[in-house]
Amino acid sequence: MQDIVILMLIWIGSQTPYDIHGSLPNIVLTEENNICKNYGIDNKGQCQAAAIKGFYNKRYTIYLPSHFDVASIEDQGRLLHELVHYVQWSNGKQNSSCLGHLEVQAYELQDQWYSNHNLDRVTDPFKMVMLEASCDD
């Protein structure tokens, strides 16, 4: 897993102005309900409805589902999305005027990763508009 993380960090660094140097994040494979609990959702029904595919907890830890397959491009895209958040926070972007911008950037880079690997982009354009709309700057 470390090799793909390093490769993805280098790729993120080539696509953004972020500094990618430093320690690697912790990667934890766990059950969906544990990902939800770390995200702040304790209700099983809300957890299933949220369909969280991964989570970065801002303490250098990325949580991914236990069925994560490092050989799967789709799963790699989910890891990449969380790595973008790791890099954003490592570069002080948590103080951004709107966290929606950071989420949009993570989805855009995830979709670019998929496109580079001949997969369709997965992010709903309406979702992107709504994330941006939450920002008033």
Image (cartoon, helix red, strand yellow):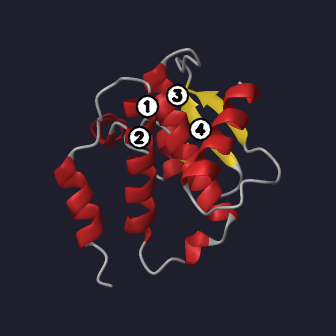
Could you tell me residue 49's position as x and y percent?
27, 38
Of mark 3 and mark 2, the one earlier in the sequence is 3
Kind of residue at badge 4: Tyr
Of mark 1 and mark 3, the one earlier in the sequence is 3
Give the crowd class for mark 2: few <14, some 14-19, many >=20 residues within 10 Å: some
- Confirm or deny contact between disc 1 and disc 3 (CB under 8 A): no
Q: Is residue 42 above or below residue 105?
A: above
* Residue underneath mark 3: 76
* Residue underneath mark 2: 112
Of mark 4 and mark 1, the one earlier in the sequence is 4
Give the crowd class for mark 3: few <14, some 14-19, many >=20 residues within 10 Å: many
Q: How many marks?
A: 4
Mark 4 or 3: in front is: 3
Q: Is residue 10 above or below residue 29?
A: below
Residue displayed at 29% across by 63% down: 131
* Residue underneath mark 4: 63
Mark 2: which secondary structure?
helix
Mark 4: which secondary structure?
strand
Residue 86 visible somewhere in the drawing: yes
Could you tell me residue 62's position as x and y percent?
62, 42
Q: CA distance from mark 4 to mark 1?
A: 24 Å
